[in-house]
Amino acid sequence: MKAPLYFGLWIYRTLLILALPLISFRLWWRGQMDPAYQSRWRERFGFYDASLTKGPIWFHTVSAGETIAAAPTIRTMADLYRSDDPATPFLVTTMTPTGSAQVASLLGDVVEHCYASYDFTFAVRLFLRHVRPRALVLMETEIWPNLILEAKAQGIPVILMNARLSEKSARGYQRIDWLAAPVFRALDLVACQTPEHVQRFANLGVNGDRLHLVGNVKYDLQVDADIGERAQSQRQRLGMVGRRCWIAASTHPGEEEQVLRAHQQASQHVPNLSLFLAPRHPHRSAEIEPLLDKVAAELGRDWCLYSEFLASASSGGSRPWSIILIDQMGVLMPLYRMAEVAFVGGTLVPRGGHNPIEPASLRTPVVAGPHNFNFAQVYSDLNAAGALRQVTTETFGAILLELLNDGAKRQQMGASGDAVVQANKGAMQRGVDLITPILDTVR
């Protein structure tokens, strides 16, 4: 069956088709900037490898952050269902190569992966016809009209896990109620992070008995028991023993300049200080390098790429670089553990902020800017507990230096952050308990 067509959906589909040349060009352009986007591009338009197993339980996780958060839930569900039927297939789709890399790293032994198609009607139908999923579990705020409505038309349950909806996004959906209302009503289950999110989804038309408060599954981050030993080993391997360091992670354009100014200011008083700078998208390294050349010259020290840093350390040639630019994925956890302070990006520019739970779970004090609407409740919890310092362009350097000079304060903030993380665990299991009865109906 096809999704019932209504006026709002007809408008949406017409606009999408008109935008097809632009969307195709954008995919090509991203492929020029990041060659990873050139791989398997046909999947974006609904054409898939015949080897994909039919009838999977399907999770859609978008990018790296959602994949990391969803991984424990997916693995738990796979263990649960395969205890009865070892052949139960699981599929994870993403939209970005970084998400794909995390699927391979965290779940490669239990799931298959492909890219999700764009929300063109033809592409979604081709995907559903090819894969024939039993159920669709969306993570966070992936509200795609064709995807949801076409799945429902084929009798596929649609579940939204770890659901969040900012006030700004809710207002946006209300403005296009002519399109969005039937989409929200089609959701079979929405497991929300906070009471505010529950109310916003209710206001958008989600049936009350389908709304549940479970908390944020990102608090259920599984930290390796040996992370301390790994961090210490990394410090020795990199020749960082005796040096101090901090990290700025998931930064965006416009933030690197502010991070580097803060590093300059702190380095005047902490001469053996190193910065690990990790842009949200590692392929931006070439874009950032001229800025690093300028700052390094002003500091009278050098910078290097993390990959080169590792290579020189392995050959015994490591030296005390002032700035190390992270150009790899999946390396942040030991660096968070090594760092005395962690800045979380997307907060000094209006991107809404990235996940501060990872450094907090490792007892590393967190600093961030004011733009945190993507994780508003998490930032509020950390701030209330004294585990977070909010900075601005003007105060960043001073607050960084203050924390670097106050070991007792860093220790207190780290303990408070870990306490917040521990107190909020359990959302994953609550979510699993909610979705299991729905998935049981499609075994």
Image: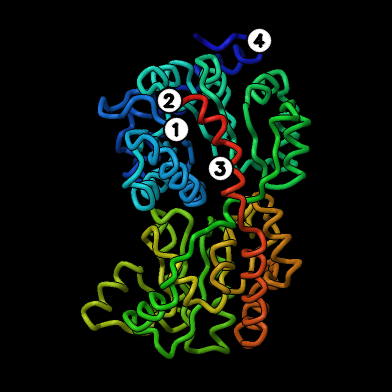
> What's the residue type where badge 2 is placed?
Pro
Q: Secondary structure at mark 3?
A: helix
Q: Who comes first in sequence, dot 1 or dot 4?
A: 4
Q: Residues within 10 Å of mark 4 (few under 14, many from 20)?
A: few
Q: Which mark is residue 7?
A: 4
Residue at the spot of label 3: 432
349 relative position to 194: left or right: left
Three-letter code for the amino acid on which mark 3 is drawn: Val
Q: Residues within 10 Å of mark 1 (few under 14, many from 20)?
A: many
Residue wearing tag 1: 58
- Asked whether 178 or 207 is in front, the reply is 207
Q: Residue at x 70, y 67 (%)?
A: 390
The outermost residue toward the left is: 315
Query: Marks 2 and 1: CB-CB under 8 Å?
Result: yes
Say left or right for 212 vs 276: right
The kind of secondary structure element at disc 4 is helix
Residue 288: x and y, percent? 44, 61
Mark 4–mark 2 Cα distance, whole angstroms, equals: 28 Å
Q: CA distance from mark 1 to mark 3?
A: 14 Å
Task: Give the Cα distance between marks 2 and 1.
Answer: 6 Å
At which x and y percent is residue 196? Answer: 77, 44
Q: Secondary structure at mark 2?
A: loop
> Residue 372: x and y, percent?
67, 55
**Residue type pointed to by label 4:** Phe
Please tell me which residue lies in front, 17 or 73.
73
2 or 3: tag closer to the N-terminus:
2
Question: What residue do we see at 54% from left, 84% from top?
Answer: 267
